[in-house]
Image: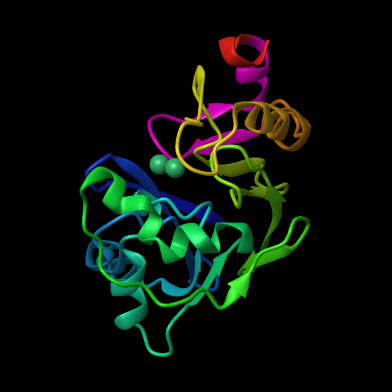
Amino acid sequence: MLQVLPLVLGPVATNVYLIADDHTNEAAVIDPAWDGQAILAEAQSRGWRIGQIWITHAHFDHIAGAGAILANIKPPPSLALHPADLPLWQAKGGAEWFGIQIPAIPQPDILLQAGQSLRVGQYEFEVRHTPGHSRGHVIFFCAAESLAFCGDTIFAGSIGRTDLPGGDEETLIDSIHTQIFTLPDPTRLLCGHEEETSVGKERKSNPYLR
Ligand SMILES: [Zn+2]
Ligand SMILES: [Zn+2]
């Protein structure tokens, strides 16, 4: 079974997702927001081995825990990011715009592309490029489990902010229509903040997407 453990970490209550195939104990971290040691401890207590870190987008509140995870696992997990968010990555995710310091983080070693597939144990995830909140934002869709990790694209009843550098509202709305609303209605949407929702629910009632 695919295990999904959400953790809410950091100064802006970001959802970190620790996912694992419980047959093989292979695990990945999606958006290590903060406190890498806490994420590691959760994995260790379950016997999960973190082999990969996947980043939906490079805002500071989704990446700040990556350094501690990479430094404490031998060999270090791979680190995957869409190249259009590399400038944001170099700028430490814009932490300084908010007067926040984050620790240094190594360069990503996997550059994600639309349509690429990623795997945790037996579970396959499709990478979909969803610019608008940031230029290199991606979501990770697992068809077999009918869920998508959608970062800061869409929220229950809302959409991601588009006022930060690289943001664009028209682009975001287009990404949601072409990359998220093309998924089946029952698909669970596990967001970067707050509670989960589904494609069907947001298609019906999200006021930003009429
Ligand atoms: Zn963001
Ligand atoms: Zn965020």
Q: Position of residue 31 (x, y in %)?
A: 43, 55
Q: Position of residue 67 (x, y in %)?
A: 33, 73
Quarter location, residue 43: bottom left
Residue closest to the eye, 23 or 135 = 135
Which residue is drawn at the image coordinates 34% and 54% (left, top)?
33
Q: Position of residue 108 (x, y in %)?
A: 51, 73
Residue 167 shows in this picture: yes
Which residue is drawn at the image coordinates 72% and 29% (left, top)?
174
Residue closest to the eye, 187 or 62 = 62
Quarter of the rendering occupied by the N terminus: bottom right
- Does residue 197 sit above or below 112 in this rendering? above
Q: Position of residue 188 (x, y in %)?
A: 59, 34
Q: Is residue 169 left or right of residue 52?
A: right
Quarter location, residue 202: top right
Image quarter for ligand 2: top left
> What residue range appears in magenta?
187-204
Please say whether residue 60 is one of the residues in the magenta stretch. no
Q: Is residue 36 left or right of residue 55?
A: left
